[in-house]
Amino acid sequence: MCFADTSVSVDIDPDEITAIQYRCMDCKTNFKGLGKKISCPSCQSKNVKKM
Ligand SMILES: [Zn+2]
């Protein structure tokens, strides 16, 4: 019997977790953000939407 080695890799590459694109609803600026507390880099507004 030939048994194929199908070891599953569950390594999570930190680079896989890319920054999420956000859009500021106040000044319409598109920016990338990481984390939970996202605020617009342009106007500091927290009225942002995930793209
Ligand atoms: Zn803004």
Image: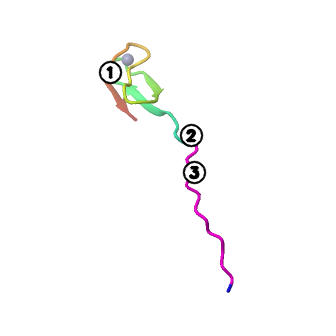
Residue picked out by circle 1: 46
Q: Looking at numbered disc 3 in the image, what kind of residue is underneath it?
A: Asp
Question: What quarter of the picture does the C terminus occupy?
Answer: top left
Badge 3 or badge 1: first in the primary sequence: 3
Q: Residues within 10 Å of mark 3 (few under 14, many from 20)?
A: few
Q: Residue at x 40, y 19 (%)?
A: 40
In the figure, residue 13 lies in which quadrant? top right
Badge 1 or badge 2: first in the primary sequence: 2
Between residue 21 and residue 38, name the one nearer to us. Answer: 38
Is residue 31 placed above or below 19 in the rendered structure? above
Residue 9 forms part of the magenta stretch: yes
Q: Looking at numbered disc 1 in the image, what kind of residue is underneath it?
A: Lys
Mark 3 in CB contact with mark 2 (< 8 angstroms): no
In the figure, residue 38 lies in which quadrant? top left
Q: Looking at numbered disc 2 in the image, what kind of residue is underneath it?
A: Pro
Q: Element type at marker 3? A: loop
Residue 4 forms part of the magenta stretch: yes
Residue picked out by circle 3: 11
Q: Quadrant of ligand 1?
A: top left
Q: Residue at x 52, y 37 (%)?
A: 18
What is the span of residues highlighted in magenta in the rendered image? 2-15
Residue picked out by circle 2: 14
Mark 1 in CB contact with mark 2 (< 8 angstroms): no
Q: Is residue 20 left or right of residue 46?
A: right
Between residue 28 and residue 13, name the one nearer to us. Answer: 13
Q: Element type at marker 2? A: helix
- Which circle, 1 or 2, is nearer the viewer? 2
